[in-house]
Amino acid sequence: MSATNRSGARQEGDFYKTPKWAIEAVWPEVYSFLNEKALVWTAKNGGEALWCLDPCAGDGSLLQAVVELAGKSEVPVQCSGIEIDRGRWEACEKLFPCFHANCLNLGDAAPSWGSENRKPHLIFTNPPFGQALPILQRAIAEVHPDGLVAFLLRLAFLESEERASFHDENPSDVHVLRRRPEFVQSIKCKGKKPSPATHHPGLNPGPVACGWSVVLPIEAETPRVCSNCGGPVSVTRSDSSAYAWFLYGKDIGGKWTILPGKPKAA
Ligand SMILES: C[S@@+](CC[C@H](N)C(=O)[O-])C[C@H]1O[C@@H](n2cnc3c(N)ncnc32)[C@H](O)[C@@H]1O
């Protein structure tokens, strides 16, 4: 759930890849919950593998991080996704079973969230900004009775009249990221360009700010100069909001912690 960045621009389709360090930071909390509920034990001892669903899967990178982290603890895990955007769905589908759909409107595809007999043990995502609440409500309704819902949300999700009754009815543990995640890079031109010629040279206001700006995914190559005027650029990398992982599950609620920040080398 990324906010607009400082420039106010948004990424196409609300696609903001969750940084791996942010997933690693909350993983011990996730693992310890699933362990306490014996789901880890069951998976390790020949029972059902842990099923992790990302209902807004993007290109599957969050699920890849889950596979890696679960692998380190030798927990068998099966991941699947739902993704509305065709291009990202195709990328995710190469890695995991992924359903190309709106996760709030699956129609006949309802089993993608699970079924009466089989429900996801972990619903783990970073939902789109505008649909966080309905997707979270759906996740809480669909998760395994002993399972966990983990959503990366702006800390401001705690606010607002609109969400007050939801929070009362669905207490969460809130694990705040020490540092703001970098979802996008915002590049702005610092240069000036000549003002348009006027018929009265004496009235020419001189060079004016170029004004060019662009928002790119964090992993994209950063332009060194303005593509409009060739002038110098400034780059802003962090998001304008504080973020936290909101966890929902049996016996959860009312605890908050500050998680480790982004390691220097990440
Ligand atoms: C913030 S990105 C997160 C991607 C990935 N989960 C991650 O953490 O890196 C949100 C993704 O949700 C997808 N999306 C938005 N609305 C959706 C919906 N109603 N159903 C399924 N996917 C949706 C967007 O296309 C985008 O890829």
Image: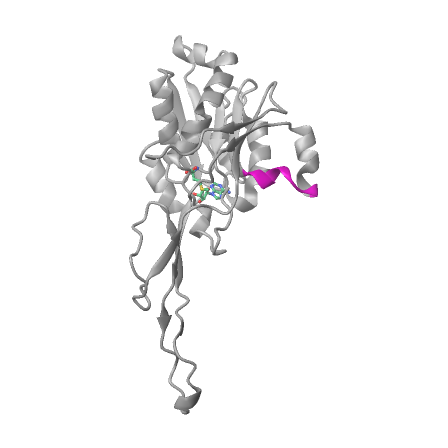
User: How many numbered marks does the figure carry?
Assistant: 0
The x and y percentages for residue 55 are 47, 35
The x and y percentages for residue 111 are 49, 29
Question: Residue 201: within the magenta?
Answer: no
Residue 16 higher or lower than 187, as above or below: above
The x and y percentages for residue 198 are 40, 87
Any part of residue 120 in sight:
no
- Which segment did they paint magenta? 154-161
Camera-side residue: 38 or 93?
Answer: 38
Q: Residue at x 57, y 34 (%)?
A: 136
Image quadrant in which the C terminus is located: top left
Residue at the outermost bottom position: 200
Q: Residue at x 60, y 24 (%)?
A: 255
Question: Residue 159: within the magenta?
Answer: yes
Question: In the shown orientation, is residue 35 left or right of residue 223?
Answer: right
The secondary structure that dominates the magenta segment is helix
Q: Residue at x 39, y 81 (%)?
A: 196
Residue at the outermost top position: 45
Camera-side residue: 183 or 97?
Answer: 183
Any part of residue 261 in sight:
yes
Camera-side residue: 250 or 20?
Answer: 20
Residue 158 higher or lower than 130, as above or below: above
The x and y percentages for residue 2 are 49, 44
Q: Quadrant of residue 53?
A: top left
